[in-house]
Image: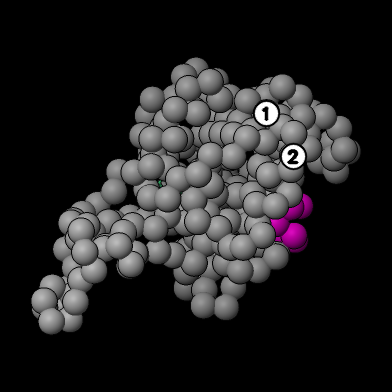
Amino acid sequence: ALALRGERDLDGLRVAVSAGGTREPLDPVRYLGNRSSGRQGVALALAAADRGAEVVLVAAHLDDGVLADAARHPLIRIERAGTAAELGLAMRAVSEDAAVIVMAAAVADYRPAEVAEGKLTKESGVLESIDLVQNEDIVASLAARRHPGQVVVAFAAETPQDEAEMLARARRKRERKGVDLLVVNEVGWDRGFEMAENTVQVIGEGGAVRARASGSKRSVADDIWDVIAADLG
Ligand code: CTP
Ligand code: CA
């Protein structure tokens, strides 16, 4: 794997990567969101582009500064998407002619059933509870309509009791979503999200562990691309 680094082994490969967390508006001043920093997704985009791939990076909400290097990269084009619905539309469009789809974004599972025109108030009583509706599973729908040879990669952040439970969940999730590869990492109150480092396992066909990677999000990204590159043949 290390021998590949520095080489343009992904030259000309068209890649679609999503990164960051979606925000689902409730009213003009509030949203439902999550703690995704976007770092692992952007690292995947940069790693691919440095290896010669042509990358479209669909960026949801990310921490400040995370996009800076990607914005300067000649092989990366950035599109913005705020909500799950916008991200789904953008990914569907850019996936048409992508050989690889990497869904690293943290997509909200639910959105408020109604978005209020004006700011909701305590006086109105409606802030007591919020009705939610489920968002489409974007990566599952991209996998269901993928064309022959297209590789679809999903991510999962889990808070398991132990390693065995994490792998079991990851294997079920890979099957459920119908993706080729599922990258799983353990998260918690104090790990995973805003960190520079990450530890992941890549689950492939039949639930096999194709790779375990630990280190900077960039080096983890390169290890993930090594697995994808092997599948592209
Ligand atoms: N994902 C997606 N569309 C959604 C939700 C998730 O495409 N509406 C994608 C993420 O981008 C990621 C993977 O699915 O690649 C991870 O989803 P995850 O939240 O772990 O799985 P869920 O099926 O939502 O299950 P859970 O109940 O554990 O959240
Ligand atoms: Ca989810």
Which callout, 2 or 1, points at the residue further toward the start of the chain?
1
Mark 1: which amino acid? Answer: Glu
- Left-right relation of 100 to 230: left
Res 127 quadrant in image: bottom left
- Considering the image in quadrants, where does the N terminus appear? top right
Disc 2 residue crowd, few under 14, some 14–19, many 20+, Cα 10 Å: some
Q: Residues in magenta?
A: 213-221
Label 2 is placed on what type of residue?
A: His
Q: Is mark 2 within 8 Å of ligand 1?
A: no
Residue at image position (50%, 56%) is 61
Q: Tag 2's secondary structure?
A: loop
Return the x and y of residue 209 as percentages of the image width and height: 60, 47
**Would residue 56 appear left or right of 230 to someone viewing this image?**
left
Nearest the eye: 211 or 10: 10
Q: Nearer the viewer, residue 17 or 139?
A: 17
Of residues 1 and 77, which is closer to you in this image? 77
Q: Which residue is mark 1?
A: 54
Residue that numbered label 2 is attached to: 73
Coordinates of residue 20 in the picture (x, y in percent):
52, 54
Task: Locate residue 38, reporting x and y percent.
Answer: 58, 56
> Going 56% across and 25% down the picture, which residue do you hit?
98
> Is 214 contained in the magenta span?
yes
Image spot of residue 217 (x, y percent):
70, 57
Where residue 127 is drawn, which disc sits there? none
| Residue farthest along the bottom direction in this orientation | 123
